[in-house]
Image (cartoon, rainbow, N blue to C red):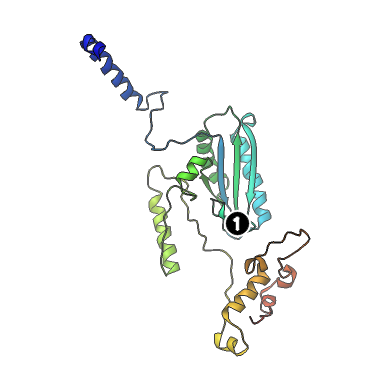
Amino acid sequence: MQLALRGGPRFVAIFLGCMAATALLAFPLGPLPGLGQDFFPSVDGGQIKLHMRARTGTRIEETAALCDAVEATIREVIPASELVNVVDNIGLPYSGINLAYSTSAPVGPGDADIYVNLSGHHKPTATYVRALRSKLPATYPSATFAFLPADMIGQILNFGLPSPIDVQIVGFDTAHNREFANRLLQTLRGVPGAVDLHIQQSSDYPQFNVDVDRGKAQLVGLTEQAVASNLLVSLSGSFQTAPSFWTDPRAEPSTRSSPRLLSSGSRISTISAIPP
C-alpha cells in the first residue's frame, strides 16, 4: 500500500494498463481464444461418444454393418496417429441393470454407441466433432447422429441425461403429442448454437395390435395380463416377465418360442394362453 501511495500516477498507469490487458484477453482476438461464456468450460479429455440410430426396425446385424462403415468414415477424418481405439456398443443392454448405467437411452437394435479415444498428442477434440457432425449425416442420411458428453464433468452437469437440454411433452393424446413434438423440433432447429436435435422416442416401430374380448376371456379364466404375459414370453422371452439370475453358468432360465414357429401372423395367432 505504501509503495502504491508513493508511486502516485505511475502506479495508476500500471494498474489501469493491467486492467485493460485483462479486459482484452476476455474477448477472442486473433489466436487468443478468450475466456468464453460457459459457467463450466468444456474439458478436452480426448474422448468422443457418438450415438447413432439407424432406421426404426433395423436388425442388429445390419446395425453392426452400418457401424463398421461409420468407423471407416471416422478414421478418414481422424488421423491414425491420433487415434487409439474405436469401440462399438450395439443394441439394447441385456438387463435393466445395465440400462440404468447407460446415458444414451437406446430404444432398439438400431441404436449404437461409438466410443473414440484419442492419443495424448491430438488436435482439439471439438475440431473433429465439428467435422464429423457435418460429414456423417451427409454420408449416411438414413441414420441420425448425436454427440453425447464423453467426459465425467459433462455427464454430471447433464444429470445423466443424453443432452444438456431435455424437453418433455406430456399428454394423453399420443398422435397430437407427436405432431406437436415435430413442430417444436423444427422451431428449435432455428435456435443459434443448437446441434444434434432429435426426438428420442420412436413412434414408427413395426408392431401389430392384439384385441382381447375381456368378456369371452373371463369365461375361460383368462385376464388381460395373462394374455399379454404369454405373448411377451413367446415373442421376447421370459426374462421380460420374470427375470432370474443364476450362479450356475449351465442354467438357462430365460426361455422363448423358436422364431421358426412364429414366422407369420397366422402362427402368432396360435399361441396358447395359460391362465394365471
Instruction: Tell me what residue is drawn at x 41 percent, y 55 percent.
Output: 167
Using the rendered image of the protein, determine whether residue 209 is visible from the camera's viewpoint. yes
> Which of 179/164 is in front?
164
Residue 264 x/y as whole percent? 69, 73
Measured along the vertical axis of the image, is residue 34 above or below residue 241?
A: above
Q: Residue 87's spot in the image, x, y percent? A: 64, 43
Q: Is residue 117 above or below residue 55?
A: above
Image quadrant where one finds the N terminus? top left
Which residue does the image show at 35% across and 27% down from the upper left? 26
The answer to which of 81 and 93 lies nearer the viewer is 93
Q: Which residue is mark 1?
A: 97
Give the residue type at disc 1.
Ile
Q: Residue at x 28, y 14 (%)?
A: 14
> Image quadrant of residue 8?
top left
Q: Position of residue 267 (x, y in %)?
A: 70, 76
**Dot 1: element:** helix
